[in-house]
Image (tube, grey):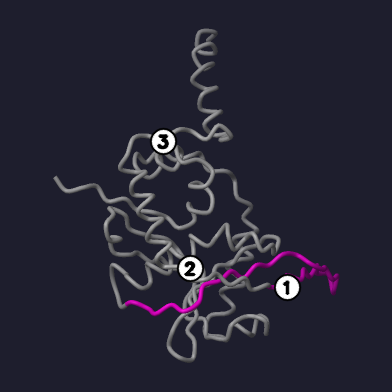
Amino acid sequence: MESKKYKLSPPDFAYLYEECKCCYYLKIKHGIQRPSLPFPAVFGAINTRVQGTLIGKNLQELSPGLPEGIVESQEKFVESKIIPNTNLFIKGKYDLIVKQKDGTYIIVDFKITSPDDDKVTKYQTQLQAYHYAFEFPEKGEPKVITKLGLIVVYPDKVFLKKGQAILCFPPKWLEIEIKKENFLKFMKEVNDLLEGPTPPENPDCKWCEFRHHGEKYAHLFNNKI
């Protein structure tokens, strides 16, 4: 019987995988997802509008401190072939793909957050996953990726002008080093996790704690009805 293939979403590496291996296992292997938290729509609106204005333009029009290149597309899905020696493939929606003068590409991820250097560590696996998917796509031609990075924006100043509040979001570029071998090694670890028994819960995982409280007390409330 053919082995099950597991679809991995790049954003899960920055949050779910690091927070609780048990919750990650339950989502990927059994389709049991954590309840989603409300996400303020304003962040998505800011992200989409800023990115949308850059299509067909040089990234440096946003800021001269950003890499040079023409923004080719925004917020589209990319899917990889099966990763060698695993049953895994990558599928996710990237933010921007930028074409450089030499024909190679930059993968850019927008973040509305404080521009701390620890963001490189937090999001590096997410960007490495997009890199792999572009170079080994399930469909279409591969792209040669030579740069990965975050454009981090955070409200700095506000101006009141003609009935409008104008927020300034100065962008900061945080480049992420391409580490293909490290990524493939990590993918093997993820594959081993998914092919093995259910991993232990993270004792600090609030979702696991909530689940167990439900198991413990739900019958008490039911008996009172």
Instruction: State the image coordinates of residue 215 (x, y, percent, origin top left).
Output: 49, 20
Q: Which residue is mark 1?
A: 170
Q: SS of the residue at dot 2? A: loop
Q: Can you say whether 198 is above or below 195 in the image? A: above
- Of tags 2 and 3, the one toward the viewer is 3
The mark that comes first in sequence, 2 or 3, is 2
Q: What is the three-letter code of the residue carrying label 1?
A: Pro
Residue at 44% x, 84% y is 104
Rendered location of residue 17, percent (x, y):
48, 47
Give the foreground label among 2 and 1: 1
Identify residue type, mark 3.
Pro
Q: Which mark is residue 199?
A: 3
Q: Which residue is mark 2?
A: 75
Q: Choose between 140 and 44: the one closer to the eye.
A: 140
161 in the magenta segment: yes
Q: CA gap, disc 2 to disc 3?
A: 33 Å
Q: Amino acid at mark 2?
A: Glu
- 61 vs 186, left or right, is right
Q: Residue furthest bottom?
A: 101
Q: Nearer the viewer, residue 115 or 59?
A: 115
Residue 141 horizontal/vertical position (percent): 31, 78
User: Residue extending furthest left?
Assistant: 1
Residues in magenta?
Answer: 142-171
- Residue 79 appears left or right of 148: left
Neighbour tally class for label 3: few under 14, some 14-19, many 20 plus, Cα within 10 Å: some
Predominant SS of the magenta segment: strand
